[in-house]
């Protein structure tokens, strides 16, 4: 079965992490999100996938190649200009064939039952089936109310509370009869959500919603990136954790060295060659990438530290993200969903709070950034 994975977005809300890495290639518990997504598709027999890229396309090609390592066939197609979600699929129409295809946004972590989705699509004799997920605040999204038989009634973009008639939103995974792409203009920015779907509905094409209470998270923001890690480590979604389980719910890769006076609080995931120094404390809910070094007395909680980062003596990292190869001097404090990009050097006694974001390759002198309490 064929699929299309949309991976061409700029991932602006996840900057600075996405300045150096496209969003679908960001690691989730030390595995690129896209690899998890592809393996999920493969599990349901979708083993030929067209990757529609645009932003930093070489990163996908270099990592996955033709897909044979995953036992899949991957076709890479890169846009010169962003064509939007539907324009991107139109752009790969020549690879789709005549059979029903699955189209996925490449920034979704989910355990959706794709077999059930396909059966539903066939049973309803639908032309398009849109996966729907319930959310707490429906006013922030496009809502998709349904008739009792599951047929889509309308598309409601960001309604006010008095217009809210459902909490089901478009979850970014579609099963589509490729014939519909004949009516999409080529080489033009075109959206599923705002253009093709409302137009098909107006034409009376059979479109159904597939409500699902599966795990679903779009990795749009740093807070959601952290949440994905926390949810996996709390087993809200069952993604296999890499490495060996060295204590209950503490997974470690190869050649990890933990000082005997260090404390590791589960759940935690440690990459290959991680080194944790004396009196350091790591966890709970931490993920450390390959070659991360945690120096003596440092404390890390609820955070993601990417490959090759060095956390200096007595640093405190709380609920935050530290980019690849970033080096922190002594007593640096990173808290409150702050994000440090890749290759930063922050010398001693700096403090990052309130979700500040520091761009890659910045050098910050000792004691330069401080936050004072306002209460
Ligand atoms: P933000 O800039 O933070 O909104 O992130 P984004 O660029 O990823 O956009 P969004 O979350 O709306 O995109 C949903 C999915 O569609 C992501 O997997 C994107 O990579 C992908 N996508 C968005 N726009 C395009 C596009 O123009 N072309 C292609 N090929 N993919 C796209």
Image: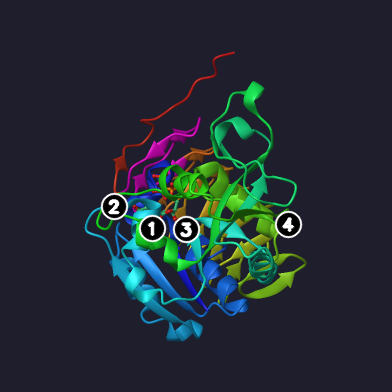
Mark positioned earlier in the residue sequence (3 or 1): 3
In this view, the residue farthest toward the left is 80
Q: Which mark is residue 325?
A: 1
Disc nearer the start of the sequence (4/2): 2
Q: Choose the circle earlier in sequence order: 3 or 4.
A: 4
Quadrant position of residue 261: bottom right
- Above or below residue 200? Residue 60 is below
For mark 4, does the 10 Å Cα neighbourhood hold few (<14), some (14 to 19), or many (20 or more) residues? few
Q: Which residue is mark 4?
A: 236
Which of the two discs, 4 and 2, sits closer to the camera? 2
Q: Residue at x 62, y 59 (%)?
A: 110
Residue 272 vs 20, above or below: the answer is below
Asked whether mark 2 lies closer than 8 Å to ligand 1, one says yes
**Residue occupying the far top of the picture:** 375
In which quadrant is the C terminus drawn? top right
How far apart, in angstroms, are the residues tagged by discs 4 and 1?
Answer: 30 Å
Report the colour scheme. Answer: rainbow
Which secondary structure, mark 4? loop
Provide the secondary structure element on which disc 2 rests: loop
Q: Is mark 3 within 8 Å of ligand 1?
A: no
Image position, residue 199 (x, y; %): 45, 46
- Which residue in the protein does label 2 denote? 82
């Amino acid at each position: 079965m064929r699929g299309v994975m949309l991976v061409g977005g700029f991932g602006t809300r996840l900057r600075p992490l996405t300045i150096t890495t496209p969003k679908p290639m960001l690691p989730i518990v030390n595995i690129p999100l896209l690899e998890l997504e592809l393996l999920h598709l493969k599990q349901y027999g979708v083993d030929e996938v067209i990757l529609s890229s645009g932003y930093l396309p070489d990163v996908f090609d270099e990592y996955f190649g033709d897909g044979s390592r995953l036992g899949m066939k991957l076709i890479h197609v890169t846009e010169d200009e962003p064509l939007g979600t539907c324009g991107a699929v139109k752009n790969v129409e020549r690879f789709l064939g005549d059979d029903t295809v699955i189209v996925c946004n490449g920034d979704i972590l989910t355990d959706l039952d794709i077999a059930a989705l396909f059966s539903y699509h066939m049973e309803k004799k639908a032309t398009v089936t849109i996966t729907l997920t319930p959310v707490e605040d429906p006013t922030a999204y496009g809502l998709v109310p349904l008739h009792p038989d599951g047929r889509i009634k309308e598309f409601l973009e960001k309604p006010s509370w008095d217009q809210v008639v459902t909490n089901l939103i478009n979850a970014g995974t579609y099963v589509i009869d490729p014939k519909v792409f004949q009516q999409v203009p080529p080489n033009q920015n075109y959206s599923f959500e705002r253009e093709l779907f409302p137009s098909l509905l107006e034409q009376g094409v059979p479109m159904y919603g597939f409500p699902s209470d599966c795990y679903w998270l779009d990795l749009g923001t740093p807070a959601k990136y952290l949440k994905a890690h926390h949810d996996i480590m709390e087993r809200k979604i069952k993604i296999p954790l890499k490495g060996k389980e060295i204590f209950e719910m503490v997974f470690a890769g190869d050649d990890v060295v933990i000082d005997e006076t260090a404390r590791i609080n589960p759940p935690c995931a440690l990459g290959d060659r991680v080194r944790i120094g004396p009196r350091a404390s790591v966890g709970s809910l931490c993920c450390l990438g390959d070659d991360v070094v945690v120096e003596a007395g440092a404390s890390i909680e609820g955070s993601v530290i990417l490959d090759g980062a060095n956390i200096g003596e007595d640093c405190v990292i709380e609920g935050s993200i530290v980019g690849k190869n970033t080096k922190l001097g002594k007593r640096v404090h990173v808290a409150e969903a702050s994000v440090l990009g890749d290759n930063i050097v922050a010398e001693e006694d700096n403090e990052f709070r309130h979700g500040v974001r520091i761009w890659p390759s910045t050098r910050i002198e000792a004691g330069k950034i401080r936050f004072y309490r306002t209460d």
